[in-house]
Image: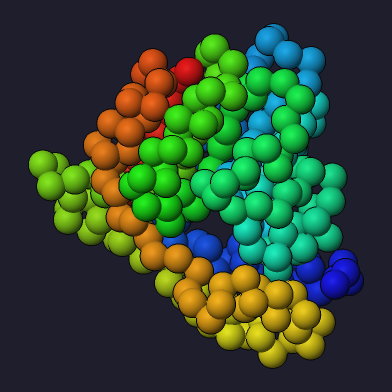
Amino acid sequence: MGLSLATAQRWVDRWELQQQRYAVDREERFTVIADVVEHVTAGRAARPLVVDLGCGPGSLAARLVRRLPEAEVVAVDRDPLLLELGRTHHPDAARYVDAEIGAPGWLGALELDRPLDAAVSTTALHYLDRDTLSAVYRQLAAVLRPGGVLVNGDHLPLGEGGPASIAAHVGRCRAVRQRAFAQEDWHSWWAAAARDPELTDLLADRARREGGAATGRPAGLSLPAHLDLLRRAGFGTAGPVWQYGDSCVIVAVR
């Protein structure tokens, strides 16, 4: 199922553009996540250990190792096509692991040899339902070192008690100004990928795993709901460190 570097680069480049539709100020979000990881690992470990949850084609992992070249990144995802794109296009960014976050045994599949300094994610955890997310947060709290962090950049509505619709509107306005909606969308990207013969086997594997179902349904949990689950999971403090509209980076400290 190996891909050529040219094919991987073409599809990762298109992925990067497509994702701009779904993450307001996506590049700034990546930068903030790297800022946090750099801050909490400074002077603490010769080789910080970081897990990238729902890594896709390695977008966040690649940016992290550019900032922290000494870090060891373990990148996990369930999608065989996106994982192969990451392995081919960003081979030195991470050790890629094929596992479904929250499924039985997923944490053991990462083969961690020491406590984590950080667990990071971007635009991925909203696919987990409340019960699965709660369990994942508890599992991560157990393998993070004291002072380690979980850093999640995602779509996190403010909740019914806050100006959620206004925040979403502000985010959409920002995306329009950045011409984000000029890019192809998620469905167009996958439809185009289906026409590339070099991706046929990986797409067939993906379809077998999904059993013809969709990749998942966003749980739509609000920012307050995430913070509550994190505190219940054993994190000492949790809160947003960056936000534009409902695009948010939250940090939970073990």
Give the left or right position of residue 154, taking residue 196 as reference.
Answer: left
Task: Tell me: residue 51, above or below residue 115.
Answer: below
Q: Nearer the viewer, residue 177 or 120?
A: 120
Give the left or right position of residue 84, taking residue 240 as reference.
Answer: right
Q: Residue at x 75, y 84 (%)?
A: 200
Give the left or right position of residue 195, taking residue 126 as reference.
Answer: right
Q: Residue at x 69, y 90 (%)?
A: 195
Q: Residue at x 39, y 65 (%)?
A: 217
Quarter that holds the N terminus: bottom right
Number of numbered discs:
0
Q: Nearer the viewer, residue 5 or 226?
A: 226
Task: Tell me: residue 74, above or below residue 45.
Answer: below
Task: Tell me: residue 15, above or below residue 39.
Answer: below
Task: Tell me: residue 107, above or below residue 233.
Answer: below
| Image spot of residue 215 (x, y percent) | 50, 69
Task: Identify the image quadrant of residue 13.
Answer: bottom right
Residue positioned most to the left: 161
Q: Residue at x 69, y 9 (%)?
A: 43
| Image spot of residue 211 (x, y percent) | 56, 77
What sort of colour scheme is used for the picture? Answer: rainbow
| Image spot of residue 227 (x, y percent) | 31, 32
Q: Judge whether residue 213 can be spotted in this image.
A: yes
Residue positioned most to the top: 43
Q: Nearer the viewer, residue 199 or 36?
A: 199
Q: Judge whether residue 178 can be spotted in this image.
A: no
| Image spot of residue 81 (x, y percent) | 70, 68
